[in-house]
């Protein structure tokens, strides 16, 4: 049995069907009210996985509010064990976007070292690792291969914060997502060529417009953060999650009828 097979069957199916929807509240979001709103929206909107800051009390809150599996994100592996005890199903190194404005960047060797330490601490827990988009694409692909060999179960991309769209509307949304889409294609292609079966999650800068593109370039699922977190009402959050859920389910439906 692989570690991914320890996850709830519904979550396993979403990964296998390339329709995983993960809602991200933010690695540095320790506000209980905010996490509660996002967690509730994720659960009611049909998300498969909820990604929150690595804090045991937030895990307990998120599990109760969302009723879906919870992933905790951090760059400090020592924080993971207590979060898992509190109910987290997945641990993740990343996301890194929040560190870049302060001039904090992560090298491939540092990310790999954090992954190895996390795996040592929790050998039986599903481990996801974000690949920094600040690395050249060939280095991102190589890091993904190294992570696969070190026992990582999921790889996630990023890039939305570095994108500077110049166009309005739909074209601007595509421009916003281009870095993470490019990373997803490069990483998924490298993993496929090496016969690795590690799923790739495309995250950062995505919208309803670009979610189908993420799946088409090799992603098994998507991570949505600011598209939901920036909204002012829970009704709007739920509607956005549902819209992305429907977009992913439509892709799954067309893939089924075309088989």
Image (cartoon, rainbow, N blue to C red):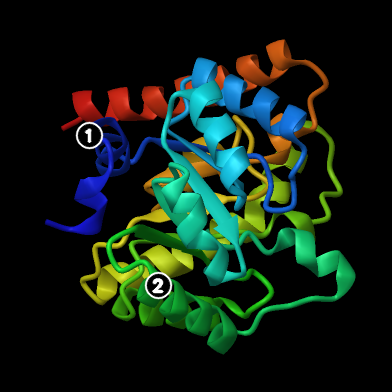
Measuring from the top left, give residue 205's x and y in whole percent: 68, 47
Q: Is residue 183 left or right of residue 249?
A: right
SS class, disc 2: helix
**x%, y% of residue 200?**
40, 56
Q: Position of residue 222 (x, y in %)?
A: 49, 43
Name which residue lies at 22% across and 34% down.
Answer: 9
Q: Quadrant of the N terminus?
A: bottom left
Which quadrant of the view contains residue 58? top right
- In this image, 128 relative to 40: left or right? left
Quadrant, the C terminus: top left
Q: Residues within 10 Å of mark 2 (few under 14, many from 20)?
A: some
Residue 258 or residue 8, whichever sits in front: 8
Q: Is residue 65 above or below residue 154?
A: above
Closer to the N terminus: mark 1 or mark 2? 1
Mark 1 burial class by Cα count in 10 Å: few <14, some 14-19, many 20+: few
Identity of the residue drawn at 67% across and 59% down? 159
| 185 over 202 or under it: above or below | below
> Residue 2 location in percent, x, y?
18, 58
Residue under label 1:
9
Q: Which mark is residue 121?
A: 2
Residue name at image x 74 percent, y 52 percent? 28
Q: Residue at x 38, y 82 (%)?
A: 146
Which of the 4 image quarters holds residue 14?
top left
Query: Circle 1 — which element?
Result: helix
Distance Cα–Cα, label 1 vs label 2: 25 Å
Please state which of residues 1 and 173 is positioned toward the viewer in this rendering: 1
Q: Say which of marks 1 and 2 sits in front.
A: 2
């Amino acid at each position: 049995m692989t570690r991914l097979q320890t996850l709830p069957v519904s979550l396993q199916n979403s990964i296998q069907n390339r329709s995983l929807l993960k809602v991200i509240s933010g690695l540095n979001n320790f506000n209980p009210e905010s996490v509660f709103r996002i967690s509730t929206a994720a659960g009611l909107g049909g998300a498969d996985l909820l990604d929150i800051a690595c804090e045991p009390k937030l895990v307990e809150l998120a599990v109760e509010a969302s009723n879906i599996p919870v992933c905790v994100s951090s760059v400090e592996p020592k924080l993971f064990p207590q979060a898992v005890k509190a109910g987290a199903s997945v641990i993740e190194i990343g996301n890194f976007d929040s560190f870049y404005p302060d001039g904090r960047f992560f090298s491939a060797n540092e990310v790999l070292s954090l992954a190895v330490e996390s795996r040592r601490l929790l050998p039986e827990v599903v481990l996801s690792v974000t690949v920094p988009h600040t690395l050249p694409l060939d280095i991102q692909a190589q890091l993904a291969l190294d992570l696969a060999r070190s026992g990582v179960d999921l790889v996630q991309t990023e890039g939305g914060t570095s994108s500077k769209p110049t166009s309005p509307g739909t074209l601007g949304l595509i421009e916003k997502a281009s870095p993470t889409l490019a990373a997803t294609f490069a990483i998924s292609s490298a993993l496929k060529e090496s016969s690795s079966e590690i799923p790739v999650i495309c995250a950062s800068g995505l919208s309803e417009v670009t979610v189908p593109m993420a799946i088409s370039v090799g992603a098994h699922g998507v991570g949505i953060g600011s598209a939901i977190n920036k909204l002012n009402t829970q009704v709007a959050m739920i509607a956005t999650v549902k819209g992305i859920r429907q977009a992913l389910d439509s892709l799954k439906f067309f893939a089924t009828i075309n088989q």
